[in-house]
Amino acid sequence: MKNGKKRRAFICPRCKEPGYLEVRHRGYCTYYYAYHRVRENGKWRVKKCYLGPESYSNVERFEHLGLRGIIDRDRYFKYSLRLLNKLSHKQLLALRDRIEQKLARKPVET
């Protein structure tokens, strides 16, 4: 750990390259960065990918969708569950019909 920053090895979700995840805390916010060692012209340098915040607190003040950063791999599933709670019964039935149509066209992979 360097300067109070936490690092761990992982695959970057943005560029799909191996590197290190760095978590930075600034005030009440948490931000994620990926660092990669890259060799260019015979020299090693560090490439940085900004992965975004842990959560989007500015947006959440107006719409409580539970928006999360790219690090949360289950974020789309969590968004779906939150959105389901906001739909009316009629909208849920229409959504069910669309999901059934989509499932009938494409086999489910496990």
Image (cartoon, grey):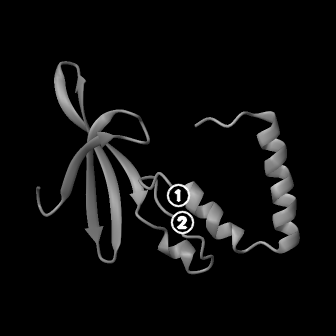
Q: Amino acid at mark 1?
A: Arg
**Left or right: where 93 falls relative to 65:** right
Q: Residue at x 52, y 57 (%)?
A: 75
Q: Position of residue 101 (x, y in %)?
A: 84, 44
Q: Residue at x 27, y 58 (%)?
A: 23
Label 2, on which residue? 67
Marks 1/2: CA distance?
7 Å
- Residue at the left extreme of this rendering: 2
94 vs 90: above or below: above
Dividing the picture into quarters, in which one does residue 94 lie?
A: bottom right
- Earlier-in-chain disc, 1 versus 2: 2
Q: Nearer the viewer, residue 66 or 94?
A: 94
Task: Residue under label 1, please give it.
Answer: 75
Mark 1 or 2, closer to the camera = 1
Query: Residue at the front extreme?
Result: 110
Query: In the rendered image of this protein, does residue 56 appear above or below residue 76?
Result: below
Image height of 42 relative to 86, above or below: above
Q: Quadrant of residue 47?
A: top left
Which quarter of the rendered picture does the N terminus lie within?
bottom left
Name the residue at 34% across, 67% down: 30
